[in-house]
Amino acid sequence: MSAPMNLAVKLGPLHLKNPVLTASGTFGYGEEFEPFLDLNRLGGFVVKGLSCRPRPGNRSPRTWETPAGMLNSIGLENCGIDRFLEEKLPRLRKYRTAIIANLFGETIEEYCEVARKADAGEGLAALELNISCPNTARGGIDFGCDPEATREVVRAVRDVTSLPLMVKLTPNVTDIRPLAEAAQQGGADILSLVNTFFGMAIDIRSRRPRLSTRHGGLSGPAIKPMAIYLVDRVRAATDLPIVGIGGIRSGEDAVEFMIAGASAVQVGTGNFVDPLCSVHVLEEIETFLEKEGIQELRGLIGSLPR
Amino acid sequence: MLFETQVEVRANKILGAEIFLLTLHAPDIARAALPGQFVMLQASPSPEPLLRRPMSFCQIGPSGSPATGPETFRILYQVAGSGTRLMTRLVPGDTLSCLGPLGRGFPLLPGGHPRRVVLVAGGIGLAPFPFMAERLRGSGIAWTLLYGARSAGQIVGVDWFRQLGGDPVLVTEDGSVGEKGFVTAPLARMVEEDRDGIEVYACGPDPMLRAVARVCREGGVPCRLSLEAVMPCGFGVCLGCGVEANRPEGGYLRICTDGPVFAGEEIRF
């Protein structure tokens, strides 16, 4: 048997033992997956988006299945940063994997407050800033669609934390490049992309929207080609390391993102379909590298000619 | 114990108007299952549809032998959309991925020493009750099934309950079999006659569950309601299947992990 393959990747200041992360909102607070997999296998996991105070989320119905995907409008339901730090994080520290807190607010002050608290919490490897949630009335995507607002919120958060800062971009813009550049100028270390695409479904008998909030965010394999396109665009606009997100449910999907320029990936909706999806993605990346005789994962990342 | 496993289709029989009984070979899941719990089942061996379907345990076994325990379980389903339509094409030998058992089922023993558990089923909401009735009978607890459906064609499985010694009360909206009207009419009579001696377990469409909850609340009878919802994950992470909690601080309960069976007073819906 050959020695275990070295899959370690560096994303600026964030070092991961392998490139497979799980996406915020699809992996709970990590603990929900303990019955299924050894969290140590993962390069890391991104917990459910956290705010200063707990949020109940949106009314039902919150999800609807669509061809090769699903719509959601959860509305950032979460236990709040304080309870996360007190009750969830201490239990998670035993894992030798990167625990990344996803954060959001409705105002710059709230973003800073939640980031300050997270920064003081022991055991976090990085912060992911959600400026791209499509499902809340205020905040989130308001910041992510305007380059000036993006720069401002990223800079403000940068000033209150020394942790590696990942900024999660929305695809719901005409051109993603100015947003990527703005995040970099604000002090982002890493860009993760993409969050969900705006979408909608209608019950044709009742003539009502399928989601209580009318519109929601589309995820799943349906968005993979669009997400890869956006990784390609962002790679052309910045030098920041990229974490690819969008419909990844196999190692081959992950490799495709990496060839396009992603240094790591996040598995999202795939976790709902199969709680072991992230581990399968990791194993399939290893298999692919072995079969193709690729020694270094680094040789794969961004290998698509510009 | 929770199992993520491949299950094999053993049978897929039509029982009524677009109502099917699917038999799956999955010893681990069959042995761990409790009445009112469910599995997340891949609807087709192909990658589409994307999400698994939540399906409650209808029957467990029969056992190969007392030593080995049950090896199969059954699911009662009705064609409601693209996923269940694909399920009708399943044939013996097909394998599907499956996660379970999941959720909090019905209490195996009713609280407060009622003499009788009244099982109230609406349409495909019959699904968990063959298993439940069998367990109640095994515990020596009396039970009655009130079973409502739109029409005679949607009434299935009555013999299962007769074989367990029960005499189901049938109600159809069009009067084609049994009493004409809604299942809450015989329920209200039972509550009126014996409010201190019964507890209600109900499963069916939301309007029926609301009506059952109201009858029970007004009669002072405890009730447990099994809710159905669009459920992407089934194990508490997507937060897609919330029901409003009946508590001062508000918020939502997850149907998949806090339920699917709730005490009537736990939820506001």
Image: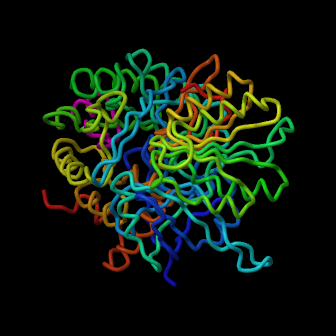
Q: Residue A275 in the image: state x and y as whole percent.
A: 51, 56
In the image shown, does B253 or A180 lie closer to the viewer? B253
Q: Residue B244 in the image: state x and y as whole percent.
A: 54, 27
Q: Does the magenta stretch include residue A185?
A: yes
- Where is B72 relative to B255, above or below? below
Q: Residue B79 in the image: state x and y as whole percent.
A: 39, 56
In the image shown, does A274 or A183 lie closer to the viewer? A274
Q: Is residue B188 left or right of residue A26?
A: right
**Where's the C terminus of chain A, which quadrant?**
bottom left
Q: Which residue is drawn at 61% across and 25% down?
A: B214
Question: Which region of the structure is painted magenta?
Answer: A181-199
- Where is B201 relative to A272, above or below? above
The quadrant where residue A68 appears: bottom left
Q: Is residue B151 magenta?
A: no
Colour mapping used in the image: rainbow
- Where is A42 relative to B14, above or below? above
Q: Residue B187 in the image: state x and y as whole percent.
A: 65, 35
- Where is A4 relative to A258, above or below? below
The quadrant where residue B121 appears: top right
User: Given the current orientation, which residue lies at the most extreme bottom position?
Assistant: A1
